[in-house]
Amino acid sequence: MKVVTLFENRTISKEYKSSHGLSLYIETNNHKILFDTGSDDSFVHNASKLGVNLEEVDIVIISHGHNDHGGGLEGFLKINSKAKIYVGKGAFDDYLTKLLGIIKFNIGLKKELLSDRFEFVDGVISIDDELTLFNNIDGDKLLPKGNDRLLKRYSDGTIKKDDFIHEINLLISENHKYSLFCGCSHRGIVNIVEKAKTIANTKVSTVIAGFHLMGMKVNSPKYAAYFQNLADSLNNSGVEKYYTCHCTGEEAYNYLRKNVKTLNEIKTGMIIEV
């Protein structure tokens, strides 16, 4: 399996566009997958530079309803007319964020893009023997603290903390191994990995995911136990290789890299074989 980082917060070269967001191209034995589209159509520019033909993509997965993961959908739809697009149930609801305790702005997806090409995921969906999508994560172990400022407008009109039921994850079975792809792991990477292992009924070999740890100060007494427990949990998860990106943040990554023996990172322009 080949994984090409089309868009991420950082880049390996100035020839690629990068900013806050995530987009991955995943080529398996049977599929050409676009996992998230970043915040705008910059991933299209990068795909061309990296030799990825977006017209050939047959499956799109938008990990959750935030515009740094689905903001480039409009650009993709202008290029590709065949791919089925999978999103979590409620992905096109209203999502907001707050700054300094004040609700600041809408971070949701454009509702006008909805069409019959979209399929909504609620539970576990096996696309075929290779691909499985899932949400409804059990457990609340080591949830990212950054979730506290992310909000959702519920059906009764109230604005409260996001429950992240719209967040979906991709599990790929190839060559008798399982690989897990997550966007921001808002439901907690430890909880998502455990659910993936239950679905696969075996260990997960590789995980590629953002951990949503930006803004959490590693050296702060407030978060010291959190980071130590997270490192211990990742080390004991049975995962052979973690790649993290996007919302994990440099400070958190540098700490985890020293304390999790299987952890590495990806940046815009990187190509890895899984």
Image (cartoon, helix red, strand yellow):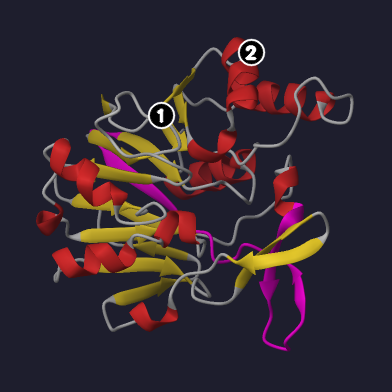
Q: Secondary structure at mark 2?
A: helix
Q: Is residue 110 above or below residue 1?
A: below
Residue 76, given in percent of the width and then of the height, sits at: 24, 62
- Left or right, 123 with respect to 12, comes to right
Q: Quadrant of the N terminus?
A: top left
Q: How many other residues sit within 10 Å of disc 1, few (<14), some (14-19) or many (≥20)?
A: some
The stretch in magenta equals 148-176
Residue 80, given in percent of the width and then of the height, sits at: 15, 65
Name the mark nearer the viewer: 2 or 1: 2
Q: Is residue 199 above or below residue 94?
A: above
Residue 118, given in percent of the width and then of the height, sits at: 32, 75
Q: Mark 2 vs mark 1: which is more N-terminal?
A: 1
Residue topped by disc 1: 205
Residue placed most toward the observer, 238 or 217: 217
Residue topped by disc 2: 259
Name the outermost residue toward the right: 221
Name the outermost residue toward the bottom: 156
Q: Is residue 91 above or below residue 218?
A: below
Q: Quadrant of the C terminus?
A: top left
* Residue at x 26% of width, y 36% of height: 4
* Residue at x 30% of width, y 42% of height: 173
Is residue 274 in view from this perspective?
no
- Left or right, 131 with respect to 170, comes to left
Say which amino acid is labelled 2.
Asn
Q: Secondary structure at mark 1?
A: loop
Magenta span has 173?
yes
Check residue 219 in the rendering and tell me which mark sits there, or answer none: none
- Left or right, 222 with respect to 171, comes to right
Magenta span has 151?
yes
Distance, label 2 to label 1, CA atoms, is: 19 Å
